[in-house]
Amino acid sequence: MAVSAPRFGLWMFPDHPAGVLADVMVAAEEAGLDEVWLGDEGPARDPLVTLAAAAVRTSTIGLGVAVTNPYLRHPAATASAFATLAELAGPGRVVLGMGSGGDLALGPTGAVRAQPLQRVTDAVRIARAVLRGEPTEGYEPPPHSTSAPDVRIVIGARSQGLNRLASAQADGVFIGGVPLPMMDVTLEWARSVRPIDVALYPNVALSPEEVERVRPQLIFALHDSPQETLTAVGARREEVQDAVGALAAGDEGPARAVIDDRRLDQLLVHGVDACRLAERLAALSRRHAPTSVGIAYVGDDPIGALDRVAATARCFRHELA
């Protein structure tokens, strides 16, 4: 008997106008994608506002943030915002992704990522209490509170501690942008306590031209990474930090040197056409048995890329049929 293919979706960095991102999400539903996710990079375009704009224009596609952090927004406020989003979207469509955040999100405010495991643990507990309309340490539901118990909470992270936390306490895990050599061990951590839903989203470039455009940006897949990740790809933290600093100053050279062809293939899934990409994603799916698979799109034209994303989804489903 054939096994149903995982859900297929798209993750986007929120560096495009909110109207463009909302248009992409509407078009993604029309093209047959199952879910869309937005990143949260701190004081920039707000993913929740953008998802709300898409929620009232769509009816079936899943809507998630992967991931927001507990340092820039109190988890009770975050959960209340997701409960409000769920009212707009309807039952079963909204997913709250939580993590510890990185320098892109926290750096501009000077927020310090102190005790990340404890902070995310507390954030998940408080968010779940808000969504269920229950009290917990640090939160007492006010009379005017709202709830949405069907909003799922997932954790997105690269570290062992947070992935084990996901396995113990979350509804699922978002594995986004994790280098391919780290997939096996990361999923072992995420399934170490109990089986949970897995959203598997490797970085993907959809054309050879995009590969070279995004090559230097892939340095951020190593920045803030745990030592296990750097060891797996053979990179030194000092050279990664130097490359990030140079890139911020407008010099791509050091980042391109660190992301050589070997590391490029460890950090990015790419191919010459949609069906070749789908073959690689299907191979990952067979190996890791995720609940959903998708494209963490790292290009600069999400509207233009959507036809190729939809074609990849069709080939992926055919590959696993």
Image: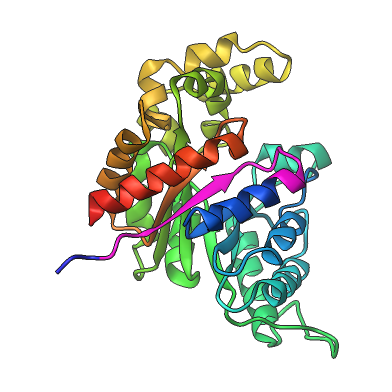
Residue positioned most to the bottom? 143
Horizontal side, residue 81 vs residue 27: left or right: right
Horizontal side, residue 245 vs residue 281: left or right: right
Is residue 273 positioned above or below 38 on the image?
A: above
How many marks can you see? 0
Display coloring: rainbow
Q: Position of residue 247 (x, y in %)?
A: 66, 18
Q: Position of residue 165 (x, y in %)?
A: 48, 63
Q: Position of residue 170 (x, y in %)?
A: 50, 69
Quadrant housing the C terminus: bottom left
Residue 19: say if magenta: yes
Q: Depth check: give the residue in front, 306 or 83.
A: 306
Q: Depth check: give the residue in front, 301 or 80.
A: 301
The reply to whether residue 40 is in sight is no
**In the image, what residue occupies the spot 62% across and 30% down?**
300
Residue 115: say if magenta: no
Q: Which residues are magenta?
A: 4-20
Q: Depth check: give the residue in front, 248 or 62.
A: 62
**In the image, what residue occupies the spot 35% across and 44% down?**
183
